[in-house]
Amino acid sequence: MNEPVRTQWQIRCAFNGYCKRALKNEAANAHRDTKRQQLREVTFSDLSPQEENQLYTNDRYFADDEAEQSFCVAGKEITAKLLAEALHSLPEEKRNAVLLYYFFDMSDAEIAELYAIPRSTVQYRRTSSFELLKRYLEERAYD
């Protein structure tokens, strides 16, 4: 098997042809896949009301206003309204520290950086808030 000796130019041309064919085939595959996907797509305006209702759910956990929003701890009934009142009774800087730490998952260092105060101050505000919340809830919680 005598193969003809190929020049550098011929090898480059053969490789370029191979690359162009590969790119052309990939473009055809992408175009075909896009067309196939477009045939299955439906716009929101074309959906029936039943199909629209399948796209979302409503959380009805707290649907019964006061009944499900309360819980008992150590023989005391605490409602969401009472807890909100307790949080509102805190001074603003302490309330912010508690809310950012527990509801926004921020660390003491992140909160300190946000308010440009020492980290230990944030920790003090947060921990001292618990004592205030405890007293407020003990005084007002239903037995």
Image (spheres, rainbow, N blue to C red):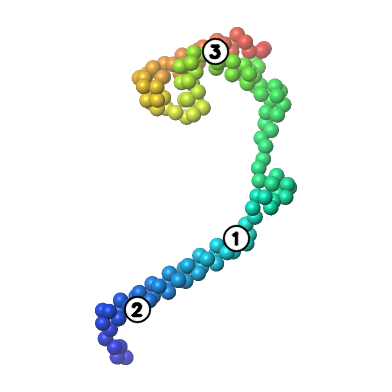
Query: Looking at the image, which is closer to me, 110 or 130?
Result: 110
Q: Residue under circle 2?
A: 14
Query: Looking at the image, which is closer to me, 44 or 143?
Result: 44
Give the amino acid at mark 2: Ala
Q: What residue is drawn where x is 62% and y is 10%? A: 140
Dot 3, crowdedness within 10 Å: few (<14), some or many (≥20)?
some
Reply above or below: 29 against 140: below
Closer mark to the observer between disc 1 and disc 2: 1
Q: What residue is drawn where x is 55% and y is 17%? A: 87
Give the amino acid at mark 3: Ser
Give the amino acid at mark 1: Gln
Q: Residue under circle 3?
A: 89
State the mark number for residue 38.
Answer: 1
- Counting from the top left corner in percent of width and height, residue 90 is at 51, 13
From mark 1 to mark 3, how far is it between C-alphas? 56 Å
- Please tell me whether mark 1 sits on a helix, a strand or a loop: helix
- Counting from the top left corner in percent of width and height, residue 110 is at 40, 27
Q: Please report whichever mark, 1 or 3, sits nearer to the chain's N-terminal start.
A: 1
> Is residue 46 left or right of 124 when viewed as pictured?
right
- Please tell me whether mark 2 sits on a helix, a strand or a loop: helix
- Please tell me whether mark 3 sits on a helix, a strand or a loop: helix
Where does the N terminus fall, quadrant-wise? Answer: bottom left
